[in-house]
Amino acid sequence: MSKSTVTLPSGKEMPLVGFGLWKVPKETAAYTVYNAIKSGYRLFDGAYDYQNEKEAGEGIRRAIADGLVTREEIFITTKLWNNYHRRGHVLEMARRQNESWGLGYIDLFLMHFPCALKYIDPAIRQYPAWWMDDAGTVQTDKVPIRETWEAMEEVVDNGIARSIGVSNFQAQSIYDILTYARHPLSSLQIEHHPYLVQSELVKVAQENRIAVTAYSSFGPQSFVELPAQFSAKAKDIQLLFDTECVRVIAKKYNVTPAQVLLRWATQRNVAVIPKSNNQARLAENLDILGFDMTSEEIGSISALDKGLRFNDPGYYLPNHQIRIFA
């Protein structure tokens, strides 16, 4: 049986397969999370920007109260949004997010993007994602990554988070953090699927014992349902489920194409955080450690790489020069 967890540099164990809370409506988040726990999920990947932390926490607390799990068996990842990168705001937001979850502590706290935006009072925040006002204004702020990282280390010092890491970072910034990090850089979360393999970035992380988590493991499938400005790149792109090599491998092992895509990541020690509202698919997405593909099969899936990134602010914020992945 394959190992079901990965050890973070902080020494904590993180499940290899979790449940992603991106796009889970807050109205159904508590119910969705509770059902995911019943299906066997123990890792839940959230973020302040998803605006469903409170409800997700309610679902977990209900499961704990019902005796389905203990707090120690649950692993919570959440993220610091871009408006709160200044030293004075990081600890405040970590405390606020920890209170929203209502679980006593955060297992893994990530810097969501390597890009600081102007501060918005979280008590009056009303715009999603990157926008500041009705006109869709995006305003950056001059905050070095080091300032934010060192403030996140204080979050660990205060017992709010057990481990810290980054999301959507590239190699240069990772190498920089490693020169001054007092607490280990435990995790890197990135868009990672066969159309965007990022093999060198994964190597950088794993060579430095940084655990890698993939989001959007199904590639275009995660974006086709979004508004036009976000889904444009996914339009007319063949779904990974339908590619010949994935379908052939799925048939060989008597599994679904989704299971093949998730196993392609976890077999390479990359954690995954798929989501589903369908009970059968919930179980399928979790049941992916029972088969191993050959190195040739892994390679054939990786060969689908197109360098095709769907979650790119430089693309869907065309009026603002924020080119994080340039």
Image: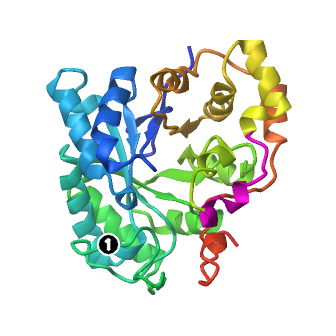
Say if 18 sits above or below 210 in the image.
Answer: above
Q: Quadrant of the C terminus?
A: bottom right
On the question of residue 94 being in view, the answer is yes
Residue at (50% x, 20% y) in the render: 280
Q: Position of residue 241 (x, y in %)?
A: 72, 33
Rendered location of residue 56, percent (x, y): 29, 43
**Can you give x and y, in whole percent of width and height, for residue 296 in the image?**
84, 27
Which colour style is shown? rainbow
Which residue in the rendered view is the most extreme toward the left?
A: 65
Q: Is residue 101 left or right of residue 163?
A: left
Is residue 324 visible in this depiction of the protein? no
Residue ID at (66%, 58%): 310
Q: Which residue is mark 1?
A: 126
Q: Nearer the viewer, residue 139 or 115?
A: 139
Q: For the N terminus, which image quadrant?
A: top right
User: Which is nearer the eye, 259 or 106?
Assistant: 259
Magenta-colored span: 228-239
Classed neighbour count for the residue bearing mark 1: other residues with Cα under 10 Å, few (<14), some (14–19), many (≥20): few
Say which element carries label 1: loop
Residue 215 in the image: x percent, y percent? 56, 47
How many marks on residues? 1
In-image side of 184 versus 298 (left or right): left
| Residue ID at (85%, 30%) | 244
Residue at 66% of width from left, 69% of height from top?
Answer: 325
The image quarter containing residue 238 is top right
Can you say whether 141 is above or below 313 in the image?
A: below
Q: Quadrant of residue 214?
A: top right
Q: Nearer the viewer, residue 95 or 31?
A: 31
Query: Would residue 183 be counted in the magenta stretch?
Result: no
Q: Amino acid at mark 1?
A: Gln
187 to the left or right of 42: right
